[in-house]
Image (tube, coloured by chain):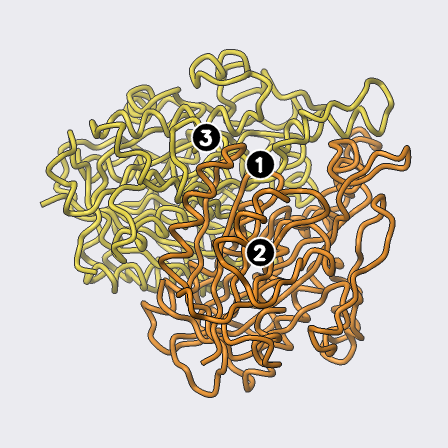
C-alpha cells in the first residue's frame, strides 16, 4: 500500500499534433488547433469550428498499424497509447501483466452512424462491421489486444471526466499492489452524435472558444487521445524518464443537474480539495491549474467560483488548453494529464488563447503568455463532466 | 480482492423477484425474441413526475438502487459504482434516428442527455444529493465485474463504508436487429440463435459483515477472444485458488443453448458442482447478465441450496469471468 505512483511515459494526439513533441511545440508557440472541419461529414461543417485531428482515417490507421475501417476512436487511442508505452523505455515483455485503463464516451459511434444511416435511408446495405465495435468497452479491448494486454482491461465512461478517472483508477490499483504498470487515459473521436448533441444543448461557440472570458459563448468540440504510463516504486528505476509523481486525486459528484454544474461549484470544489488533502498540500502550494475551462458560461462560472473560494487571494496561475485542442470529451483528462505532467517536469505554463476580458464575478484571469523556467512544484488538472462527475488530479515534481 | 459483504440486493429481470430460485421458470420464447423485464410498480418508490422524465433503463436501474438502499436500512452510500455494457441504448438509438431522419436539424436535447453511460449513477447521486465517489464501468461482458472489483478496492480504502453497486442493460429494437444480423440472436428466417435479454440489479456491499449472510469472496476476469485453451488454463488456476474440492458447490453457468458447450463440460469436470443452474435460461444473454447471476446466487445461498456459489460466465465477445459467493 505504500508505493508512490510515478508518471513514466506520455503519449498524445490532438488537433495540435500527432505526438507529444508536436503538441508541446504548439502549446509553447501558442498555435491553436481549432478551425474548420475537414474530415467529419456534417451539415454543421462551416458553422462550428472544432479541434479536429487533421488526418484521414486511412492516415491514422497507418500511424496506428491498424485496419482503417475500425472506429476512429480506436485509431486515436492506439497511436497515443503506443507512444506512451514506447516513451517509458520499459520492456514490452512487461505488457502482458500491465493494465490498460482507458476511457471514452462515444466508443464506435462514428461507424454506428454509417450503419444507422444505411439502415434508415436504405441507400446502402448496413454493414455489420460498422456496429461491431459500437460499445466503449470494445474500443479499449481492441487497443489492449493490439498492445498485448489481456488481464486488466477496463473502460470508464463518466462523460468528460472519464479519462481523469481512468488515471485515478490506475493509480489506486498500483497503490493496492494489484499491478506495477498501467497505461491510463482516454480517447474520443469527433462524430455527428456528439456535435449535434452539444448543439441541442446550445453550448457550442460558432467562433473559437474563449475560456474564462466575460464574452465567452460556449465550447468547441475536439478529438484526440492522451495516455500516461504509471508505475510503482518497484519499476521507477527501470524507466527512461520520470516525468512527475501523481500525488493526489479525488472523484466527487456535484449532484446538481444531469448536464449543468452548480453555480457554487460544489462538486469541483470537493474534487480539488480532496486531491490536495490526499497530496498533503495546502492551496498555496499549487502553482498552476490546467482548468477544465470549456468556455461555456456555466462551466467557467462554476469552476471559477470554486477556485476563488478555495484559493482566495493566492490564486495560482490558471489556463485552459482547450483553447488549443477543443473539448475532447472522454480524452481531455488524459490529454491534459500529459500536459500537466510535462508542465511540472519542465517548469512551464501554457497560455489560454483568445482571453481578453476578465469575468465580472471574480478576479481570475488565465495566463495568456507561455512561461518557461518557472519554479513549479505542483500542477492540478481539473476534469468535470455530465452527471455531476468531477475529478481533480495533482502532478508533483518528481523527487 | 477484499471480501465484500452483501447487505441487500434488488433486481429487475424477466423473473418475478420474490420467487425462490428453485421456482424460476425458463422463459419459453422463440429464439427470435428477447426476454423483457417484468417491471415493478415504479410509483411505489419514485415520484410519477420523475418516472415520466426517465428512460426505461434509468428507471429500472434507479428503482433497484432505491430498493437496495432501503433494504440495507436507508443507508447513504459512500460510493456509487455502476456498470453497463451498452449504456442507454433506447435514447442513443432515438437520437441517431432523429439525427439521420431530420438531417441533423431540429433535434431536441432530451435523448442526447439521457444517452450518456453514467446516467443511472448520476441520477442516484442527484436524487439523494450524494457528493461521494461516482463511477461508471463499460466493458462488454465484464462491465459488472469491473464494478465489483472497483467496489472492493474502494471498500478496502474506506473500511466499513457502504457502496452502492448497480448494473443495467436494455434491449431495443435496433440492438436486437443488429444481434440478429450478426447471427447471435435467432432470426425470423429460421436461423437459430441465442435468446437475448436485459435487466437491472443493485446491491449494497461493504467490508463490514454486520447482519450480512452472504459475501463475494472472489471476482476474476479475462479477455481472450477465440483462445479456448488459454481461457481453460486460467479458469483452472482460478478454481484452485478460490474454491476447495470438499466444498458443496452451486454452479451458475453462463452457457446458453449450444454455445460454449465444450467449455462448460470442462468447467463441470473441474468444479464437480452439487447443483448447476444455466442462469441465462432465466434472464437471456446481455452484457451485465452476471449481475443477475450474482443476485440469483445471493438468493440461492440464503435459501439453503448450497454454502458456496461459483459463477462462470462467457460472452460472445471473448470475455470470461469467475465470481465466488459464500454463505457467512
Mark 1 touches mark 3? (CB < 8 Å): no
The earlier-in-sequence mark between 2 and 3 is 3
Write down the residue under mark 1: A107
Q: Give the quarter of the figure containing the N terminus of chain A.
A: bottom left
> In this rendering, would A110 be left or right of A187?
right
- Circle 3 packing at 10 Å, graded few (<14), some (14-19), many (20+), is many
Distance from disc 2 to disc 1, alpha carbons, whole Å, reads: 23 Å
For numbered disc 1, what is the local secondary structure?
Answer: loop
What hue represents chain B?
Answer: orange
Which chain's residue wears label 2? A
Sort mark 1 into few (<14), some (14-19) or many (20+) by Cα contacts within 10 Å.
many
Residue A217 visible (yes or no): no
Marks 2 and 1, the one that precedes in the sequence: 1
Kindly identify which residue carries mark 3.
A143
Q: What color does chain A have in the rendering?
A: yellow
Q: Nearer the viewer, mark 1 or mark 3?
A: 3
- As drawn, B12 above or below A358: below
Distance between mark 2 and mark 3 Cα atoms: 32 Å
In percent of width and height, residue B156 lies at: 33, 68
The residue beneath circle 2 is A260
Q: Quick one: SS at disc 2?
A: loop
Q: Quadrant of the C terminus of chain A?
A: top left
Circle 3 — which element?
helix
Give the x, y percent position of residue A275: 30, 59
Q: Which tag, 1 or 3, sits closer to the chain's start? A: 1
For disc 3, the chain is A
Q: Which residue lies at the image location 42% right of the left edge and 69% below the top edge?
A: B246
Left or right of B126 in this view: A384 = left
Q: Is residue B293 above or below residue A137?
A: below
Task: Say how many tags the image has.
Answer: 3
Amino acid at each position: 500500500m505504500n508505493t508512490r505512483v510515478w508518471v513514466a511515459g506520455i503519449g498524445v494526439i490532438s488537433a495540435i499534433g500527432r505526438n507529444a513533441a508536436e503538441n508541446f511545440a504548439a502549446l509553447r508557440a501558442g498555435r491553436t488547433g481549432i478551425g474548420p472541419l475537414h474530415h467529419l461529414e456534417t451539415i454543421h461543417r462551416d458553422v462550428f469550428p472544432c479541434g479536429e485531428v487533421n488526418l484521414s482515417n486511412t492516415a491514422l490507421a497507418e500511424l496506428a498499424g491498424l485496419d482503417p475501417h475500425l472506429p476512429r476512436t480506436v485509431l486515436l487511442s492506439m497511436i497515443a497509447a503506443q507512444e506512451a508505452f514506447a516513451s517509458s523505455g520499459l520492456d514490452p515483455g512487461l505488457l502482458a501483466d500491465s493494465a490498460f485503463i482507458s476511457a471514452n464516451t462515444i466508443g464506435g459511434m462514428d461507424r454506428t452512424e454509417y450503419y444507422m444511416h444505411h439502415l434508415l435511408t436504405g441507400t446502402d446495405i448496413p454493414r455489420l462491421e460498422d456496429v461491431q465495435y459500437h460499445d466503449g468497452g470494445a474500443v479499449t479491448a481492441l487497443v489492449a489486444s493490439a498492445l498485448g494486454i489481456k488481464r486488466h482491461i477496463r473502460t470508464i465512461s463518466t462523460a468528460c471526466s472519464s479519462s481523469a478517472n481512468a488515471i485515478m483508477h490506475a493509480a489506486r490499483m498500483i497503490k493496492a499492489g494489484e499491478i506495477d504498470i498501467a497505461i491510463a487515459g482516454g480517447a474520443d473521436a469527433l462524430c455527428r452524435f456528439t456535435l449535434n448533441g452539444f448543439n441541442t444543448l446550445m453550448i457550442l461557440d460558432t467562433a473559437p472558444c474563449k475560456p474564462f472570458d466575460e464574452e465567452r459563448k460556449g465550447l468547441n468540440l475536439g478529438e484526440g487521445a492522451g495516455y500516461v504510463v504509471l508505475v510503482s516504486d518497484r519499476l521507477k528505476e527501470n524507466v527512461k524518464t520520470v516525468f512527475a509523481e501523481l500525488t493526489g486525486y479525488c472523484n466527487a459528484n456535484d449532484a446538481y443537474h444531469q448536464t449543468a454544474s452548480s453555480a457554487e461549484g460544489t462538486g469541483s470544489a470537493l474534487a480539488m480539495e480532496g486531491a490536495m488533502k490526499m497530496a498533503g498540500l495546502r492551496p498555496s502550494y499549487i502553482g498552476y491549474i490546467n482548468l477544465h475551462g470549456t468556455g461555456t458560461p456555466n462551466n467557467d462560472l462554476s469552476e471559477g467560483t470554486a477556485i476563488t473560494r478555495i484559493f482566495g487571494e493566492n490564486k495560482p496561475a490558471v489556463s485552459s488548453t482547450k483553447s488549443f485542442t477543443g473539448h475532447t470529451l472522454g480524452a481531455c483528462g488524459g490529454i491534459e494529464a500529459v500536459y500537466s505532467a510535462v508542465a511540472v517536469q519542465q517548469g512551464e505554463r501554457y497560455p489560454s488563447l483568445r482571453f481578453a476580458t476578465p469575468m465580472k464575478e471574480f478576479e481570475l484571469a488565465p495566463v495568456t503568455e507561455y512561461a518557461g523556467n518557472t519554479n513549479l512544484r505542483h500542477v492540478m488538472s481539473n476534469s468535470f463532466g455530465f452527471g455531476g462527475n468531477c475529478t481533480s488530479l495533482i502532478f508533483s515534481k518528481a523527487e | 480482492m477484499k471480501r465484500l459483504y452483501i447487505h441487500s440486493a434488488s433486481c429487475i429481470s424477466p423473473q418475478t423477484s420474490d420467487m425462490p430460485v428453485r421456482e424460476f421458470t425458463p422463459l419459453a420464447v422463440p429464439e427470435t425474441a428477447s426476454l423483457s423485464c417484468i417491471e415493478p410498480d415504479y410509483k411505489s418508490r419514485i415520484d410519477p413526475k420523475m418516472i415520466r422524465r426517465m428512460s426505461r433503463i434509468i428507471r429500472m436501474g434507479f428503482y433497484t438502487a432505491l430498493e437496495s438502499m432501503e433494504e440495507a436500512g436507508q443507508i447513504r452510500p459512500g460510493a456509487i459504482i455502476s456498470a453497463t455494457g451498452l449504456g442507454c441504448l433506447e435514447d442513443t438509438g432515438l437520437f441517431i434516428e432523429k439525427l439521420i431522419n431530420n438531417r441533423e436539424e431540429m433535434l431536441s436535447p432530451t435523448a442526447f442527455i439521457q444517452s450518456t453511460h453514467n446516467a443511472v449513477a448520476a441520477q442516484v447521486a442527484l436524487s439523494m444529493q450524494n457528493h461521494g465517489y461516482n463511477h461508471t464501468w463499460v466493458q462488454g461482458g465484464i462491465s459488472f465485474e469491473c464494478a465489483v472489483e472497483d467496489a472492493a478496492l474502494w471498500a478496502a480504502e474506506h473500511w466499513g463504508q457502504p457502496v452502492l453497486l448497480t448494473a443495467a442493460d436494455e434491449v431495443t429494437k435496433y440492438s436486437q436487429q443488429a444481434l440478429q444480423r450478426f447471427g447471435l440472436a435467432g432470426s425470423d428466417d429460421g436461423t437459430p440463435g441465442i435468446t437475448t435479454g436485459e435487466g437491472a440489479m443493485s446491491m449494497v456491499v461493504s467490508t463490514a459483515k454486520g447482519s450480512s449472510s452472504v459475501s463475494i469472496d472472489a471476482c476474476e476476469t479475462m479477455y481472450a477472444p477465440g483462445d479456448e485453451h488459454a481461457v481453460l488454463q486460467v479458469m483452472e488456476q482460478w478454481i484452485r485458488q478460490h474454491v476447495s474440492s470438499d466444498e458443496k458447490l452451486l454452479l451458475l453457468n453462463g452457457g446458453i443453448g449450444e454455445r460454449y458447450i465444450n467449455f462448460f463440460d470442462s468447467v463441470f469436470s473441474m468444479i464437480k458442482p452439487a447443483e448447476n443452474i444455466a442462469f441465462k435460461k432465466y434472464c437471456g444473454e446481455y452484457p451485465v447478465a452476471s449481475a443477475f447471476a450474482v443476485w440469483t446466487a445471493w438468493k440461492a445461498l440464503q435459501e439453503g441450496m448450497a454454502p458456496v456459489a461459483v459463477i462462470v460466465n462467457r460472452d460472445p465477445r471473448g470475455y470470461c469471468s469467475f465470481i465466488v459467493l459464500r454463505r457467512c
